[in-house]
Image (spheres, rainbow, N blue to C red):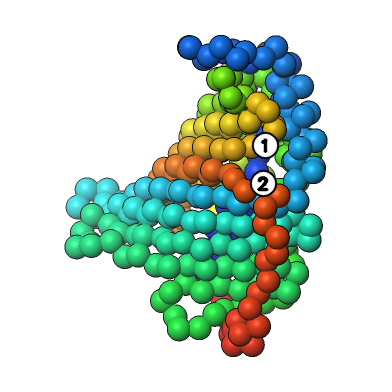
Amino acid sequence: MKKWGIAFLASLVVLVLAACNDSAVPTKGSENNSELTLEEVYQKALERQNELESVSAIVDMEQEMSFGSGEEAIEINSKSDMKMDMITKPLSVYMEGTIGTGDQEAAEELNMNLKMYMTEDGLYMHDGLEAYWTKLPTDDFDAILVQTAGQVNAAEQLEQMKEFISDFKFEQTDSSFILKLDTSSEKFNEFMLGQLNLNEMLATEETQQLLQDTKFEKVGYEITINKETFDITEMVNNINFTMNIEGESISTISNSKISFNNFNGVEEITIPQEVIDTAQEIEY
């Protein structure tokens, strides 16, 4: 569970963009309309992204997971509220917040406080249920660092999303460009599986089989870009997927919103020496 928890936290760092050649459709009531095409907007956003040295974000995520049927049906809900600071070079991340979980039979929701540091010195996490910090083993950390660095690379994301260019809708308000994608295609299912392919971090036959038995039934993206600065200010992601584990079907609905702010305002992320000195390495 520790490894999955760390993978979840690392995945919140991901930024996604896409491009096409149509100009944005104005939303009702908007007056400050731009004739820029999505391709042009993307290029400007990409240039801005490459200049970005740091950013902060507020992450809200809700998830509903259900499995079983009849009297044996179980539904588990979780909600996370996180704050994140990130420096791009060298990649450094600090996150803190809460994750709440509960099921239909629980008298009250279980809330857990989380903190995480990720720098070149390692990945350290405190989950509030234990009185000490934990450290990810070096081999696993190296894999996460490489993967996360690739995911926050906007140019790499564009290359991966090229085949879905025609599926995006492009809109604009007075202050923002909005990119939207809603799909359930088999092609996108394969793409999402590729994004979740954590070979380096979770290189087991069981994990690979789990990914192969996962189907994305609905995927929705909404990405908001500031018209003046071309910063990504918000990303909304709604995903419905089903996975089969030992013959049991588990359905998950995941909705998340990431609001970005404080562009180039994060000066330094340093792991406190006390955390480094007292952390216990995770054992699986």
Seen at 45% across and 48% down, the residue is 61
| Residue 139 image point, x, y percent | 73, 73
Give the amino acid at mark 2.
Answer: Phe
In this picture, residue 168 sits left or right of residue 106: right
- Residue 66 visible somewhere in the drawing: yes
In this picture, residue 146 sits left or right of residue 204: right
In this picture, residue 277 sits left or right of residue 155: left
Q: Nearer the viewer, residue 261 or 127?
A: 261
Image quadrant of residue 178? top right
Dot 1 alpha-carbon crowd within 10 angstroms: few under 14, some 14 to 19, many 20 or more: many
Seen at 80% across and 35% down, the residue is 47
Question: Considering only vertical position in the picture, is 206 above or below 158?
Answer: below
Dot 2 alpha-carbon crowd within 10 angstroms: few under 14, some 14 to 19, many 20 or more: some
| Residue 241 image point, x, y percent | 47, 42
Seen at 72% across and 24% down, the residue is 41
| Residue 128 image point, x, y percent | 43, 74
Cα distance between the residues tagged 1 and 2: 8 Å
Give the amino acid at mark 1.
Answer: Asp
Question: Considering only vertical position in the picture, is 106 above or below 182?
Answer: below
Disc 1, SS: loop
| Residue 34 image point, x, y percent | 67, 14
Cβ–Cβ below 8 Å for labels 1 and 2? yes
Seen at 65% across and 83% down, the residue is 273
Disc 2, SS: loop
**Quarter that holds the C terminus:** bottom right
Question: Considering only vertical position in the picture, is 181 above or below 12?
Answer: above
Q: Which mark is residue 153?
A: none
Q: Which mark is residue 231?
A: 1
Residue highlighted by disc 2: 263
